[in-house]
Amino acid sequence: MITNNAFAGRPVIDSLLKNVKYFSIQKPSFGRDTLLINTLWELGYYAIYFREKNDKLLLDSLQRLTNRTQWQAGKGLFLINKSFYDSYVRNDFSIGLKDALKAKEILSKTNNFHALAYANLRISSIMLWNLGNEKKDKFSIAGIQAAKEMIVLGERIHDFDIQCQGYIYAANHYNFNNDSKNATQNLEKANEIISKHKVGYLTENLFYGTYGVLFSYTNQFEKALEYWEKCLKIATPQNDFYTLSSMNRLKADYYYQYAKKKDLDAALKLAQESFKYATQFGVLKFIATAQRELYIINRLKGNNAIALLYLEQFWKNNDSLSREKIQKVYADYELATKESQIQKLENLRLIKEAEGKAQELEYLKTLQVKNDSLILQKNEKVASDYQLILRESEVKKLENEKLQTEANRQKMIRNLLFISLLLGASLLGYFFKNNQKLKAKNREIEEALLKGQTIERKRVATELHDNLSAKISGVKWRLEAIQPDFRIEKQRQIYESSVNALSEIYTDVRLISHNLLPIELETKGLTVAVENLVTELNSLEKTKFSTKIIENIGRFDNRIEYELFSIILELSNNILKHSGATDALISLQKTDNQLQLLVKDNGKGFDTNKNHSGIGIKNLYSRIEALQGFLKIENTAGLQVKIQIPVIS
């Protein structure tokens, strides 16, 4: 059960929570479930971003719902949030990247371009978090490519948030590569969209923060501070710990590194705020970054003991085993303390100097002893520093060896990844080529089958009309010519009913032979064929058929027109034989690339909840499935059959 108490009172979260609750109480259906999955996904995405305490609960709920509905796009949405959770909360970017790539693979096979764009967003974000030190890093190139795909998808579905975030993520990668020109171009395009359209919180937040970083890279610090303040202004009401920590840290950097007049007090206060929000955010990467900032500023202020504490915490969170640097900071702190004590003795000497020459001599001796002691201590410190330098050199050598080993490992991983991608691309190309050949062969088979069916139907129609119909008519005329004199009324009734039955059979055969493949279906299309069929049906004077066909509906693929005409004929025959209806309607409508057929009557219908296993119903479903369409049967004051299929005019 999801309750308001489970969240931290953020406006964007509150709004999404209301939508989830609304859809949750609606009557279960596939349509309801897909809407609920979309809303639950967005709520879970924000919950992970804001590090809400029940982000895992929402992720599990989304997984259960997608498993129940078996909706492919829903599976992709779940993997997007799982990627976000694995990267952000579990600090495992390798699993996060695997989830994001799987989501992209699934969503590429659907028409859910919105979700596909967010899969690319996760990929670009993971690449950004794991960039190497060299320019044009492969991760950066992959991140820019994913961002560009976001832009294309956003333009395709007219989603301004996705377009903007694509431009912003591309700019972030260009910032890393010191490519301020491309970074500026992308951010200007994002700014153009934001100035004309309303965008979501995350888009606006990301835009201000990234633009501020670009301004700082190009030494436009006043502009950088302005944009960081804008970012803080919108992040504060949302309790966005990630943004609050990042912006305060960037401002602290400015005050102790780049400001014309360095302000270490202001920098320290901002760094403490950054550490507070990083702790609330709970991600070790951000906590360690804030601790390193506090170490640097406290060291510059001379707070060596505090600086040492933060440095120890920083190395702990970064899993560092190097203690030599911590010992050096501590040695500097001890030396500063001893020099402070010597300065106090010097001040005391000045005071005692006024007491007389006798005391001065004694004091000078004492001072000489102290100075000798200080010189000795400094000599000892020089020796200690020399030993420390030697140890640091050894540690540095070990670290370089470790870094070289890690670099070699990363290079091997990148080479393996490249080879895997190349192999995967080759396999995809092979399968795509084979798939195209199969599709072409299937089209040839379908065309040949349709052509064969058409020829056979013409032959059968001709046989029915020219042979069977003529024979039935001849039998009927012979019976009528007999004109017998019946003495028993029952014999006369049997005779008349036989003549009438032959008339009905003759009419049915004519109708079947005409409708097996009406010439107007081939020459003039589905609309004219349906109207002529209705005229034939109304001539039977059983049920009054009417049509509602949109003007200029055009022609469609021969197979589609034939299958739809056969479906209409089957449904019309059922109405005549079984419904007992007085009125019936045949409607054809077209919207975008969807053709909608509606056949309904005012008859007695049948129970749609029962299992109807007749050949007619099975043929109906089979035909619709072959056209990749959708069929729905309803009882609403009669029987109503709705059919929707994709078409290209």
Image (cartoon, rainbow, N blue to C red):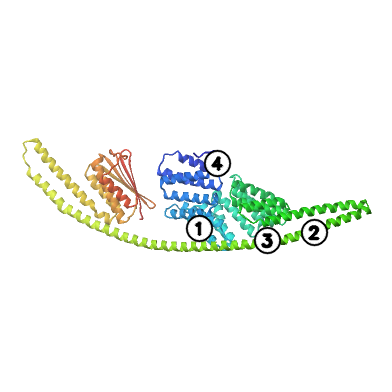
Q: Nearer the viewer, mark 4 or mark 2?
A: 2
Disc 2 to disc 3, how far (Cα)? Answer: 22 Å
Image marks 1 and 2: residues in contact by CB distance under 8 Å: no
Amino acid of disc 2: Leu
- The residue beneath circle 4 is 7
Disc 4 to disc 2, how far (Cα)? Answer: 63 Å
* Mark closer to the chain start, 4 or 1: 4
Q: Nearer the viewer, mark 4 or mark 3?
A: 3
In the image: residue 407, left or right of residue 533: right
Crowding at dot 3, Cα within 10 Å, few <14 / some 14-19 / many 20+, comes out as some
Query: Which image quadrant is residue 462 in?
Result: bottom left
Mark 2 element type: helix
Image disc number at residue 376: 2
> Which residue occupies 44% across, 44% down?
65
Image disc number at residue 146: 1
* Mark closer to the chain start, 2 or 3: 2
Disc 1 to disc 2, how far (Cα)? Answer: 63 Å
Disc 4 to disc 3, how far (Cα)? Answer: 51 Å
Q: Nearer the viewer, mark 1 or mark 2?
A: 2
Amino acid of disc 1: Ala
Amino acid of disc 4: Phe
Residue 555 image point, x, y percent: 32, 55
In the image: residue 608, left or right of residue 192: left
Mark 3 element type: helix
- The residue beneath circle 3 is 391
